Amino acid sequence: MSTRRETVRQALTESSGFRSAQDLYADLRSEGSKIGLTTVYRALQALSDSGEVDVLRTDDGEAVYRACITDSHHHHLVCRGCGKAVEIEGPMVERWADSVGTQHGFTDITHTVEVFGTCADCAAAKG
């Protein structure tokens, strides 16, 4: 693994929740790294392709990233307020996706499911 890719992976590992490429870039630069924004995007893409990071799209369409906690297929429950994310399994979702694909003659089914809400801490802060 390249040093720059490892730098980006480490920044994600030390981060809580999902982070945008711009946020990671700003953090790395503020820590004195000479890494470029294009390099951050390339590293994130490589880490995503290898399954080392999770990627999801926010409500406004921005891609955000987080170091994977587990190697198995999973989904996320994400707080809209603070960005806290919980990895969740969804066996019913898996069966449904396979069933819908089969009904329509599709094979090699994959899917992404993200569930957004408000975590208990953010809900309590709102009063």
Image (tube, rainbow, N blue to C red):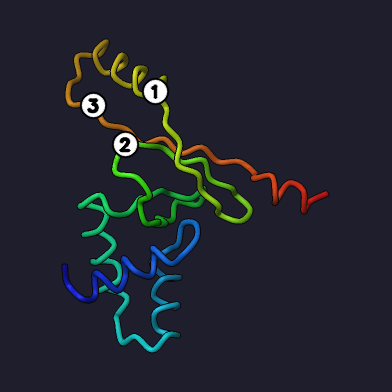
Residue, x 44% and y 77% (percent of image)?
Answer: 27
Q: Is residue 112 left or right of residue 17?
A: left
Amino acid type shown at disc 2: His
Q: Position of residue 120 (x, y in %)?
A: 69, 44
Near-viewer residue (71 or 119): 71
Q: Residue at the spot x=42%, y=31% of the render?
A: 89
The amino acid pointed to by label 1 is: Pro
List the residue tagged with mark 1. Answer: 91
CA neighbours of label 2 inside 10 A, class few (<14), some (14 to 19), many (20+): few
N-term-proximal mark, 2 vs 3: 2
Question: Spatial distance from mark 2 to mark 1, Cα to Cα?
Answer: 10 Å
Left/right placement of residue 58 relative to residue 43 reads right
The answer to which of marks 1 and 3 sits earlier in the sequence is 1
Q: Alpha-carbon distance for marks 2 and 3?
A: 13 Å
Foreground mark, 1 or 3, reads: 1
Q: Residue tagged by mark 3?
A: 109
Mark-to-mark CA distance, 1 and 3: 14 Å
Q: Secondary structure at mark 2?
A: loop
Q: State the SS at label 1.
A: helix
> What is the residue that sits farthest to the front in this orientation?
70
Please report the residue visible at 70 percent of the width from the left and 50 percent of the height from the top.
121
Above or below, comparing residue 11 to residue 35 in the picture: above
Per the image, the residue denoted by label 2 is: 73
Residue 126: image location, x then y, percent: 78, 51
Q: Quadrant of residue 33?
A: bottom left
In percent of width and height, residue 103 lies at 27, 10
